[in-house]
């Protein structure tokens, strides 16, 4: 007999997992997705509810136990990765990087710039540009890179038109030169 708490957790887990899968497929197929914060919250609800449900399903069938074992294992590995921060942490983070959200660097008039997490050995100065749509969605406008180092966000300006964005910025390595990049909508 399932308890009310177990049923509620299972429903929450299935709904969050479904939203995460639909978002991942939708992001892969189209240029729209959930905002980074909402996506991260949905992923964490999935992991936490799965980890709690593992203890409810310890005496269940082997398939249920194996499925729910994934969640406490991922949680444990993530904690070990953040604590060790050495070679072991590096290897674990390489395996778990889909759970790590992109870093929001800059926002102006509904245009958001993220530094996408691509693992510990990613190249420098790549930025993902997204436009906020409605309340929980973002439209991916593309990726651009700074050729001369990290961007100084206090010297950054974005001009918008219907067809393009004009991003004007200075970099940390060449503070005197102002660069411009055009991103098509």
Image: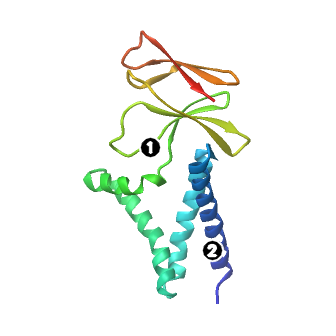
- The mark nearer the N terminus, 2 or 1, is 2
Residue at x 63%, y 69% (from the top left corner): 14
Residue 58 shows in this picture: yes
Residue 75 image offset from top left, x and y in percent: 44, 63
Choose mark 2 or mark 1, whichever is in front: 1
User: Tag 1: Cα neighbours inside 10 Å, few (<14), some, or many (≥20)?
Assistant: some
Residue at x 49%, y 82% (from the top left corner): 63
Residue 119 image offset from top left, x and y in percent: 38, 46
Quadrant assignment, res 139: top right
49 and 31: which is toward the camera: 31
Q: Which mark is residue 117?
A: 1
Q: For numbered disc 1, what is the local secondary structure?
A: loop
User: Tag 2: Cα neighbours inside 10 Å, few (<14), some, or many (≥20)?
Assistant: some
Residue at x 59%, y 49% (from the top left corner): 27
Residue at x 42%, y 9% (from the top left corner): 176
Reply above or below: 82 against 178.
Answer: below
Q: Which mark is residue 161?
A: none
126 and 88: which is toward the camera: 126
Q: Are marks 2 and 1 in contact (CB under 8 Å)?
A: no
Reply above or below: 114 against 70.
Answer: above
Residue 157 image offset from top left, x and y in percent: 58, 19
Quadrant assignment, res 20: bottom right
Going by the picture, which residue comes out furthest to the bottom?
1
Q: Say whether residue 148 is left or right of residue 26.
A: left
Q: Which mark is residue 10?
A: 2
95 and 47: which is toward the camera: 95
């Amino acid at each position: 007999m399932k308890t009310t708490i177990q049923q509620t957790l299972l429903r929450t887990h299935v709904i969050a997992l479904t939203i995460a899968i639909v978002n991942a497929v939708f992001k892969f197929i189209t240029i729209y997705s959930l905002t980074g914060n909402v996506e991260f919250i949905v992923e964490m609800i999935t992991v936490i509810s799965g980890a709690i449900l593992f203890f409810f399903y310890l005496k269940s069938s082997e398939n249920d136990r194996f499925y729910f074992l994934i969640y406490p294992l991922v949680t444990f590995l993530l904690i070990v990765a953040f604590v060790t921060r050495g070679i072991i942490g590096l290897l674990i983070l390489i395996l778990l990087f889909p759970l790590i959200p992109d870093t929001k660097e800059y926002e102006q008039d509904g245009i958001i710039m993220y530094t996408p997490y691509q693992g510990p050995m990613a190249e420098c100065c790549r930025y993902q540009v997204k436009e906020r749509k409605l309340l929980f969605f973002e439209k991916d406008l593309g990726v651009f890179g700074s050729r001369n180092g990290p961007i100084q966000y206090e010297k950054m300006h974005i001009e918008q038109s219907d067809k393009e964005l004009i991003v004007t910025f200075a970099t940390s390595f060449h503070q005197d030169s102002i660069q411009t990049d055009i991103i098509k909508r």
